[in-house]
Image (cartoon, grey):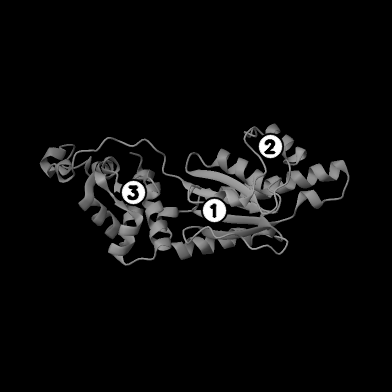
Amino acid sequence: MESSDAAAGFSALSQETRLNLMRILATRGASGMAAGELASALGQVPSTLSFHLAALEQSGLVQSTRQGRNIIYAVRFAGLRALFSYLTETCCGGRPDLCGDLARLLPDDPPEVHMTPAFNVLFLCTHNSARSLMAEAILEQVAKGRFNAYSAGSDPAAQPMPEVIAKLRALGHEVEGLRCKSWDEFTGPNAPRMDFVITLCDVLDGQQCPDFGERPVTGAWPLPDPAKFMGSEVECATMINELYGMIRRRLEIFVNLPYPSLDRMALKKRLDEIGDSAKALA
């Protein structure tokens, strides 16, 4: 285990609610508990609890699986054992046997569920043809497996802007799966659970965003709509280049936030700060 991974794990456990979550989940072993049960046991509102569970999952200490419509959370004992092993690997001058066998404090590992703990991020704009598609493609490239990117619009266009697709392709992004789609695809019971919902429109034409539940942390990063730009072909290309740079710089800040050490309110504040820093990022 790398020291940075160990620091992230211990940082996640330093928050009281997360520590209590681990203790309760440990009583259930590999069978785990549904999010609703955990919320009742800890007296926490579901949105706050979901945020803490996501932080623990991101640190490799908890794993989640879907059973029907329920998400079941369980301690990932392999991650917990790795954390303790890192802490004691230099014990007694390389004689950890003299320090006691910490492994015996933990149950045998259940069959490992191979999944990547990742935050789901949904980018919204009106037509889902430029800004939100850029953000989806960029996040998939810079996220390093720690985020899953999605995008949608309130009034999706028939197809993405060709200039945007050309720009993304030229910069090495995967573009084959990019399409314009309605945000209604992300509101049903079988839709992915979002951890973040970020609007990129300067305006949403007076429309209200749909209800994505209490779980997501929301943010607004208003950016100009390239579809409304009326300049020459060269000026339009320059504008798309600048827009790409603005989105990428914001996302590079976003993916490097210290998620295990931030509670929900602090993360919301940081998300808003990224959106308000248009002048600094331009």
Alpha-carbon distance for marks 2 and 1? 28 Å
- Packing grade of label 2 (10 A; few <14, some 14-19, many >=20) is some
> If you read the primary sequence from the N terminus, does the residue marked by circle 3 or circle 2 appear first?
3
Residue wearing tag 2: 168
Q: Secondary structure at mark 2?
A: helix
Residue wearing tag 1: 187
259 in relation to 31, above or below: below
Alpha-carbon distance for marks 1 and 3? 20 Å
48 in relation to 99, above or below: below
Q: Secondary structure at mark 3?
A: strand
Residue wearing tag 3: 72
Q: Residue at x 34, y 48 (%)?
A: 72
> If you read the primary sequence from the N terminus, does the residue marked by circle 2 or circle 1 appear first?
2
Could you tell me residue 7's position as x and y percent?
35, 49
> If you read the primary sequence from the N terminus, does the residue marked by circle 1 or circle 3 appear first?
3
What amino acid is found at the position of numbered circle 1 in the picture?
Answer: Thr
Q: Quadrant of the N terminus?
A: top left
Could you tell me residue 81's position as x and y percent?
24, 42
